[in-house]
Image (tube, rainbow, N blue to C red):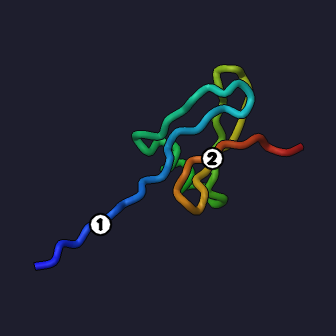
Amino acid sequence: MEKIYLHLKIGKIDFSCPYCNKIYSDVDDKYLNKCNKNKKFITKIKCTCNNIFYMTYNYMGNAVSFKKES
């Protein structure tokens, strides 16, 4: 009998505030669920530095944070 190995790649779930670099983690899928409820698949986060930034998941399944352009 031939052995078959399955490799699963889990996306990166840690992301940081683009203003102060505070690290966030989406271990419990809180932000993923918020992204899935939004039509644009992004969510807004207010950091402890009082700045607002956005996050989403890219096509590879990694969490990505970004500033909104003016």
Q: Residues within 10 Å of mark 2 (few under 14, many from 20)?
A: some
> In the rendered structure, which amino acid carries the disc numbered 1?
Leu
Residue contact between numbered discs 2 and 1, judged by CB atoms under 8 Å: no
Q: Residue furthest bottom?
A: 1
Residue 69 location in percent, x, y? 85, 45
Q: Residues within 10 Å of mark 1 (few under 14, many from 20)?
A: few
Against 50, residue 2 (above or below) is below
Residue 20 location in percent, x, y? 70, 24
Q: Residue furthest right?
A: 70
Residue 9 location in percent, x, y? 41, 57
Against 46, residue 29 (above or below) is below
Q: Residue furthest front?
A: 2
Write down the residue under mark 1: 6
Identify the residue shown where x is 66% and y is 32%: 17
Residue 39 location in percent, x, y? 63, 60
Write down the residue under mark 2: 64
Identify the residue shown where x is 54% and y is 48%: 34
Tell me which label, 2 or 1, sits earlier in the chain. Answer: 1
Quarter residue 50 falls in? top right
> Marks 2 and 1: which is nearer the front?
1
Identify the residue shown where x is 64% and y is 35%: 45
Against 10, residue 22 (above or below) is above
